[in-house]
Amino acid sequence: MAQAFTDFDTGLLLTLDALLKDRNVTHAAARLNITQSALSARLTRLRQLLNDPLFIPAASGRGMIPTPHASALQPELAKLIDRLSNFIKTAHVFDPQNSERVFRIAATDNPAAILAPDLIPMIKAQAPQIKIAFTLPDKARIATHLEQGDIDLFVGTMEDGSNELIATTLFEDEFVTAQRIGHPRGKQPITLDEFCSLAGC
């Protein structure tokens, strides 16, 4: 029967991690800064919760050998501890010098191409371990993705956003038309109708 998630605590997870790394009760207890008896009590609890011995004495009489079940748990346990560590760090004051966060910016090709060449080097100079990921926006769900944390920033037109969002103008652009020297239409301003009529020229 599977054990409830609430039966586990951080101390048990760290104990299992220390034992998998050190394979020695004395060394693992020192790593966790607890007594050997306290570590043994945690190991007993882990064995009960996971329904497995987890560790057996080594043939040499020194240290312990993880069971196949314990060895299978190690990769996922390491990932889980990393996630918990990152979760705890998010509660601290943001430190750009040491942050390893990935910031996701939703932007179409044009603004991404305009911003990325200057933005990324500027960020790397202040926050060398931070990563920037550009992603194409789902314009119908921009507000939802921002609220849920799927993206951190949206770069686009006001029409694609929402009145509920905090926005600022980054830049303004406009469409221009280029033509060859000596084009028969001359140099006067071009109208939309004229532009459309010249589409095949």
Image (cartoon, grey):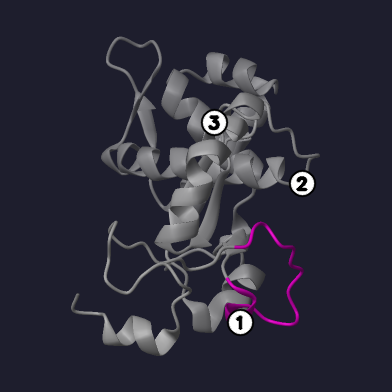
Q: Which of 165 and 116 is in front in this view?
A: 116
The reply, left or right, for residue 198 in relation to residue 172 is left
Q: Position of residue 160 (x, y in %)?
A: 57, 79
Q: Is residue 186 above or below residue 171?
A: below
| Mark 1 vs 2, N-terminal side | 2
Label number found at residue 159: 1
Q: Position of residue 194 (x, y in %)?
A: 36, 85
Q: What residue sits 61% from the left and 60% below the top?
A: 153
| Mark 1 vs 3, N-terminal side | 3
> Can you say which quadrant of the picture contains the N terminus?
bottom left
Q: Which of 197 and 32 is in front in this view?
A: 197
The reply, left or right, for residue 117 in relation to residue 155 is left
Residue under label 2, please give it.
Answer: 91
Residue mark closest to the camera, 1 vs 3 = 1
Q: How far apart are marks 1 and 3 (CA)?
A: 30 Å
Q: Is residue 143 above or below residue 83?
A: below
Q: Nearer the viewer, residue 187 or 145?
A: 187
Three-letter amino acid code of the residue under disc 1: Glu
Q: Position of residue 94 (x, y in %)?
A: 75, 39
Give yes or no for residue 165 being in the magenta stretch. Answer: yes
Q: Distance between the residues labelled 1 and 2?
A: 34 Å
Three-letter amino acid code of the residue under disc 2: Ala
Label 3, secondary structure: give it. helix
| Mark 2 vs 3, N-terminal side | 2
The local crowd at label 1, few if under 14, some if 14 to 19, many if 20 or more residues have their Cα within 10 Å, is few
